[in-house]
Amino acid sequence: MQLFSRWREDAVSAPDTVHVDVCDGIRVLSIGIVAWFHIWQQSWLWPGLTLGGLRIDLDPVIRSGYMWVDLMILISGFCLWLPWARLKEEEPDPTAGLFYRKRLARILPSYVLAVAVCFAGALGAGIFYRTTAQAAKDLITHLTFTNVFFYDTYYGTPINAGLWTLAVEMHFYLLFPLIARAFRRLPAATAAAMMALALTFRGWTAAHVADVSIYFNQLIAYLDIFALGMLAAQLHVKLAVVRRTPAQRILCSLLAVLAFVFLIKLGKEQSKCPDVNAIRLGQMQRRLSMGICGAGLLFFGANAGLFLRRILGNPVTRFLSSVSMQFYIWHQVLAVQIKWLRIVPSAYEEPNAAGDALWQSRYTALCIVSALAVSVFLTYCFERPLARRILRGGPVKRSRAG
């Protein structure tokens, strides 16, 4: 009876607009699938589950796991806009300087550390750079977040390959104060313009560029995903004042599950792409659908019933979400190094190709555990203390946004 009373009380309560807890679960899910894909690339361990004799094949989902980067970017747009969406109409726009300072305090130390460690490792190995100019270009473009503009510093770099997403994020941060001002005054028109730019760019690129490798992951190609995240945050805040009913909670739960099912379906379709160029074209073709389904999962999940919200938002997902940036930065680097250094023994020279099941399982477990341990250490002993110190270094006015 007490449980039923609590469920009914929650069903009619207004959703939280400060910390949307389902973001934690969706972020963990997205980064987890991306990480699983990267580790699977090294291990070739069959991605699936066996429950009570039932064999659940996740191979198509993990084989196309790179697509879940789109949801990571969608969540970024949602979280960036959420505090702006809470501003009252008469409140002024937050200052750009404060926004930039907070973003740099959050991202820059961890990014520079990753670049420095990977660059030093590449120099120490002595096999990656043929000339000093090549090494200098790789380092400078990474430190200036321009590495995504050159093929050799994007695909041919020994520096952490996953850092390209942080470069795209930084490009968006640079424009965000301008976009935010326009979005606050004309949200629908601004979102439509962002989506039109992204769709036009991806459509033109697919039709006129033979090799889309440098183009398909640029900021302009992701503007619709950022816009959908911002729209989801705007809608969530606007509708938070409307009193919920149990029926609405149930409907939102069903729609959130449906959005997740469509995300899985999109991944399965993407996994059928026959070659690398088809994969990139498929990503561009399905990106808008991924964004719409992801925004649906985020919005409807945030307004779903208590049971579904507790699956996505709970102490475990909140903790994992808190260390997720470090996990994303380091999991692939660690996976490659663990394999290259042959830390997990095997009788085979190429245990993944030989199908050494014991090696595959131990290697996968070690990659996950080591990445999680490094993430916890860096989050609480490096990222957060340094961010606090940077923000204390000058006057920081309290703001509800930025």
Image (cartoon, grey):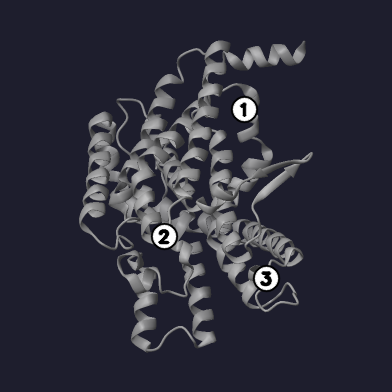
Q: Nearer the viewer, residue 305 or 82?
A: 305
Which residue is pictured at 31% across the width and 63% down the height?
Answer: 214
**Given the image, on which type of amino acid does mark 1 rest?**
Leu
Q: Earlier in the sequence, mark 3 or mark 1?
A: 1
Which residue is tagged 3? Answer: 354
**Given the image, on which type of amino acid does mark 2 rest?**
Asp
Of tags 2 and 1, which is closer to the observer? 2
Q: Secondary structure at mark 3?
A: helix
Q: Secondary structure at mark 2?
A: loop
Which residue is pictured at 51% across the width and 68% down the height?
Answer: 114
Q: Is residue 37 above or below residue 161?
A: above
In three-dimensional space, the C-alpha distance between marks 2 and 1, rounded to whole angstroms, equals: 37 Å
Residue 154 image point, x, y percent = 38, 68
Q: Is residue 188 above or below residue 376?
A: above
Residue 93 image point, x, y percent = 30, 37
Residue 215 image point, x, y percent = 29, 58
Q: Is residue 13 above or below residue 187?
A: above
Residue 275: mark: 2
Q: Earlier in the sequence, mark 2 or mark 1?
A: 2
Label 3, residues with CA under 10 Å away: few <14, some 14-19, many ≥20: few
Which residue is tagged 1? Answer: 308
In three-dimensional space, the C-alpha distance between marks 3 and 1, rounded to whole angstroms, equals: 41 Å
**Given the image, on which type of amino acid does mark 3 rest?**
Ala
Label 2, residues with CA under 10 Å away: few <14, some 14-19, many ≥20: few
Label 1, residues with CA under 10 Å away: few <14, some 14-19, many ≥20: many
Residue 172 appears anywhere in the view: yes
**Quarter holding the N terminus?**
top right
